[in-house]
């Protein structure tokens, strides 16, 4: 009924930049908080950044001043601009959002399928 699809992952050298995109589709009535999480090999999934529909943002300490989350509410999209990438940023990045669908109205906590980011020389 509703899904999130990420794009933009890939291989980048240390110090490089990458932008991830995530598009929500389906019978969408409203989107609240949108967020990016990541999961590195052998580690638990962690919050990277989130942005409410009111504009407030939160970042993990490890990415502050390097990553920027933004959203285009008209297109139901969220982005993650990643600068000064480090090898420890290597992970599968997941998009996440709270979405209300229509007919009937119902809230879903939706996850994307993930996109791999590899930071290596």
Image (cartoon, grey):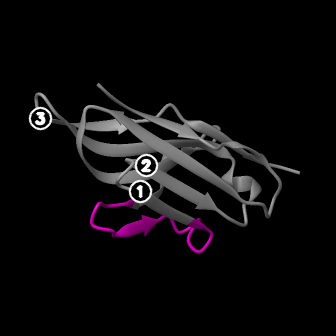
Q: Is residue 64 magenta?
A: yes
Q: Is residue 21 visible?
A: yes
Q: What is the secondary structure assignment of the residue under circle 2?
A: strand
Whether tag 1 and tag 2 are in contact, CB under 8 A, the answer is yes
Q: What is the secondary structure assignment of the residue under circle 1?
A: strand
Q: Is residue 33 above or below residue 110?
A: below
N-terminal of the pair, mark 1 or mark 3, is 1
Left or right, 54 with respect to 120, comes to left
**What's the distance in space between the residues labelled 1 and 2, CA to CA?**
5 Å
N-terminal of the pair, mark 3 or mark 2, is 2
Between label 1 and label 3, give the one nearer the viewer: 1
**What's the distance in space between the residues labelled 3 and 2, CA to CA?**
21 Å
Mark 2 Cα within 10 Å, few/some/many (few <14, many 20+)? some
Residue sitting at the far left: 104
Residue tagged 3: 105
State which region is magenta.
Answer: 51-67
Q: Residue at x 89, y 51 (%)?
A: 121
């Amino acid at each position: 009924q509703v899904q999130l699809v990420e794009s933009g992952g890939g291989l980048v050298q240390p110090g490089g930049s990458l932008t991830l995109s995530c598009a929500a589709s389906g019978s969408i009535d409203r989107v609240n908080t949108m967020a990016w999480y990541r999961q590195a090999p052998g580690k638990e999934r962690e919050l990277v950044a989130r942005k409410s529909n009111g504009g407030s943002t939160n970042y993990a300490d490890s990415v502050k001043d390097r990553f920027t989350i933004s959203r285009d509410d008209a297109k139901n999209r969220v982005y993650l601009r990643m600068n000064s990438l480090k090898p420890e940023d290597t992970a599968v990045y997941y998009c996440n959002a709270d979405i209300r669908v229509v007919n009937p109205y119902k809230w879903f906590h939706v996850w994307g399928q993930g996109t791999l980011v590899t930071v290596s020389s």
